[in-house]
Image: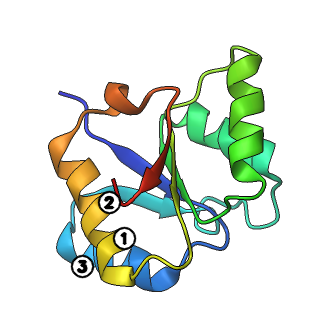
């Protein structure tokens, strides 16, 4: 069984990332910074996520959703994008990511753009 892997976007709240890592120590989750993509544009981040089969976690409602939809329209692979609005309380965001990680399979998110909390 394949496990879910995540990539967090450049401006993703570190408190959420840290909280997820504390609760699920074995979860494969990396930040754009850790992946060496600090100044990369959205299409490059989506391409990296696809090449690594990582679901992208982002707060970027304004542009990332547009780029993800454009990628899908071109028929390019996309393991999924989960958008968490900045206003979502940190604990709710952490709980939502944990729920996705523990209760779903990677293929369930393929080509999906989903807002959290569910």
> Left of 110 or right of it: where is 12?
right
Vertical side of 95 occupied by 53: above or below: above
| Distance CA(mark 2)–CA(mark 1) | 6 Å
Task: Assign a secondary structure to mark 2.
Answer: helix
Residue under label 3, please give it.
Answer: 22
Mark in the foreground, 1 or 3 = 1
In percent of width and height, residue 32 lies at 62, 62
Question: Does residue 90 appear left or right of residue 13 in this picture?
Answer: left
Q: Is residue 12 above or below residue 35?
A: below
Residue receiving disc 1: 93
> Pointer 1 and pointer 3: residues touching (CB < 8 Å)?
no
Instruction: Please identify the residue farthest to the top as the structure is shown.
Output: 75
Residue depicted at 38% across the width and 46% down the height: 5
Residue 109 location, x and y as percent? Answer: 40, 33
**Quick check: 16 left or right of 67?**
left
Is residue 65 placed above or below 96 in the rendered structure? above
Rendering coords of residue 51 (x, y %): 59, 32
Q: Is tag 2's residue or tag 3's residue first in the polypeptide sequence?
A: 3
Q: Are marks 2 and 1 in contact (CB under 8 Å)?
A: yes
Query: Which residue: 78% across, 42% down?
Result: 43
Tell me which label, 1 or 3, sits earlier in the chain: 3
x, y (%) of residue 89? 39, 82
Q: Circles 2 and 3: CB distance less than 8 Å?
A: no
* Residue with the mark numbered 2: 97
Residue neighbourhood size for the residue with mark 2, other residues' Cα within 10 Å, grouped as few (<14), some (14–19), many (≥20): many
Alpha-carbon span between mark 2 and mark 3? 13 Å
Q: Nearer the viewer, mark 2 or mark 3?
A: 2
Q: Viewer-proximal residue, 91 or 8?
A: 91
How packed mark 3 is, by other alpha carbons closer than 10 Å (few <14, some 14-19, many 20 or more), is: few
């Amino acid at each position: 069984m394949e496990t879910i892997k995540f990539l967090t976007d450049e401006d993703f709240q570190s408190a959420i990332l840290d909280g997820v890592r504390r609760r699920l120590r074995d979860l494969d989750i990396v930040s754009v910074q850790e992946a060496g993509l600090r100044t990369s544009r959205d299409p490059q981040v989506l391409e990296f996520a696809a090449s690594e089969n990582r679901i992208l976690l982002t707060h970027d409602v304004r542009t990332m959703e547009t780029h993800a939809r454009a990628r899908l329209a071109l028929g390019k692979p996309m393991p999924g994008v989960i958008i968490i609005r900045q206003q979502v309380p940190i604990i709710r965001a952490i709980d939502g990511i944990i729920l996705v990680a523990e209760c779903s399979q990677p293929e369930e998110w393929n080509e999906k753009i989903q807002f959290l909390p569910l």
